[in-house]
Image (tube, rainbow, N blue to C red):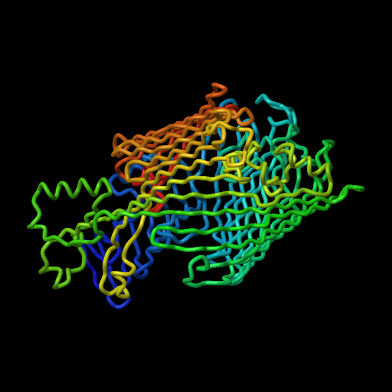
Amino acid sequence: MVKIEGNVRFITKDMTLYGSHVDYNITTGAAHIRNARILTSDFNLVANELVRVNENEYIAKEAEFTTCKDCTESWSVYGGHIRVLVGNYVQVKHGLFRVKGVDVIYLPYLVLPILSKRESGLLVPRISSRSGEGLSFEQPVFWAIDEHKDMTFSPTFWAKRGYGGDLQYRHRFTDLSWFEGNLRTVNDTIYEPLKSNVGESGEQFFRYFTDLESHQHWSPNLVSHVRYTGTRDLDFVRDYPQFTDPKVNSSDFGLQGFLNFRQEFYTIGGEAQYLRNQLYPDPIEFDRSYVQTVPRATFNTVPHSLIQSKIPFFQHIAVGADGSFTRFRQVKPDETLNIRNADRVSLQPYIMWHFLTWGPVSLKSRYVLDQQSYQFVENNQPGAGKNAGLLRTEASFTMDKVFGLAFEEKIPLKLVSEEDLKALRESKEQGLAPIQKDEKPNRLVGELPEFQTALAKDNIIQVRNSYRHSQEFKFIHHYIASENEYGNKNFTNQIQRSQDGLFDYEDAVRSQEYLFGANTTRTLVPPENTVEFQWNNTLIRKTPKNFSFLDDDKYLRDNFSYSKIGWFNISQGYLLNNREREDVRERLTRLMIEAGYYGPQWNIGLQEYYFHLGSQNIFSLNFTRRFEYINLFSNYSYNSFESSNLNSLSFGGQIRPTDVLGVAMVRDLDLEADRNIRTIYSVDIMPHNNCYILSLGYRESLVDQRYSFNIMFNFGDDNFERFRNDYFGVRRL
């Protein structure tokens, strides 16, 4: 036993301990320290008395714990008994949570993570406010059941609305198999179906929203996924958008799932869904006329080669097939004339014929026999069917040009002038020529450098990129060799009248598919007898990776990365057999132009569809511009078709004028209706002490206004560091 008094400092590999009196056991490594202080890279602790049980366990009495580095008074937890497990967690019994030295709340038991190990305990409370409804208080309780599953229960009080809470359960079976369940319940004293004001209804209405999702990877060949999203009333997504928005991705929700089995030459799958329509006037009723898919089975084969040779016009011939069986049902058939209960068998055998490749010239063709057969549930309804032979012949010419050579060069620092070094740093900021410093960072207490590194001179590594511009000219002939509809006249007329008569896109008559109102079909080139010209341009950057002689000798073969940084494409169709249109301009189908650029500061994308007949447009433009302290983004969409009638603008920005302050804003506008759809403001205060982040927010939409504030404390986890250091990379709105 060794006793040391005075200004004592004890250094380990993970921390530094200070104290006025130390009793140290040389044999066991245990120590008893008075007036102790622990400094680590993750936390600070000051205690009247500290016991070092072993290398990884410390027990402190009358102690104060914080993760703040520069200002311990920003926040701290005082406890009569604190147990520290290095690299795992901190247990605090009979604790007081302090902010700026002021006691805020008493915590009988608290667990704070130091690194990544999960531990049961109370999480930081959440407080929010909504206009007309007052404050809400949520206290999450985390239960780490074991290493593979956990649960979070969050009792919540919503001022005027009443009591409720959230429940989350997560279970990871394997790296690729998991289950997650989320539930929110509210005993609402305001809500009443079809009631729009925020006054109390006089009764309590029990509301819930649940989201259950599971993904199972049974084997390398068998995968399944099931998801259920349900609610008692449809207005829940309006009243609690922060909870429901990440869980609702369409205009319906319910039960849906799929099962997929893969083999070397074929794939078999099945999917089913039973969904609830959100676009229904009664919020607590189920739309029984909604068409359900129960179920859908699919079968696909990989292309099977019949001939592969060097003989011109017989270089490669392959065949394959895709097929499906789908059952469509309504709980209660609607009163319209459309048939909505049917069984459909779809089969598309195909043949791919690659005629030749001669230098930059390529010629190939593909023929698909697309056919569907229908059986109907209604009495006295005969079956129906349709088929079409689709032929697509393509002739292409490709040109490539390479600029520069991709390599990595190590240059002694003494040979680089200040001007060249400045230019290299500027090019690094622009993402053109990355620079790597070939030296280890200095440490106050650390390992000695290796002998060779100590004698080596400082170097910089300059990375040279190369670029490839690829141009592709294509002439594509679309042709319907045969087409036929037969059987039930009511149904064949139904699928030809409008898009409303279809179950999905497979029901469309192929020669009329492009005439329907959906953007996915109207932007297609008419397949009946049309020639299409395409001019495609792509700019690709080739960058060398970090090179190591010890990495499998893959320097020349596998030591480059490729990225698409620019593109410009044009596509125009021309009708060949439309005798009613004598003018050349009247035979032109839609014109498609798309372009984009992706770089370190700029990200821009443009797409335009122009329809010569009728002079209609479908246009979209999005861009992002990042400066050193500002990030701007915008998205504009326009559709001039009367059935779509879209003219919307979304824009916003993030500004970080100092390290302490960050401001963000996003706004969605409906220019057609001249209305503000949604506006969100947020302010983040990030003190230099790296202890906490205070986030203030305001959200205004068509249905409500919300204020929110949140405090994120630094418990040494990666999320806090990323939220603070990568301000423009983390989504805050």
> Which image quarter: residue 196?
top right
The answer to whether 682 appears left or right of 11 in the picture is right
Residue lying at the far top of the rendered structure = 674
Classify 228 as above or below 512: below
Q: Quadrant of the N terminus?
A: bottom left
Front residue of 295/479: it is 479
Which residue is at 88% across, 47% downward? Answer: 381
**Residue 586 in sight here:** yes
Which residue is at 51% across, 43% downward? Answer: 125
Classify 455 as above or below 248: below
- Give coordinates of residue 246: x percent, y percent: 56, 44
**Residue 6 in sight here:** no
The answer to whether 149 appears left or right of 725 in the picture is right
Front residue of 270/389: it is 389
Residue lying at the far bottom of the rendered structure = 27
- Give coordinates of residue 641: x percent, y percent: 59, 29
Residue lying at the far right of the rendered structure = 380
Classify 705 as above or below 426: above
- Give coordinates of residue 283: x percent, y percent: 73, 35
- Numbered-mark total: 0
- Give coordinates of residue 640: x percent, y percent: 56, 28
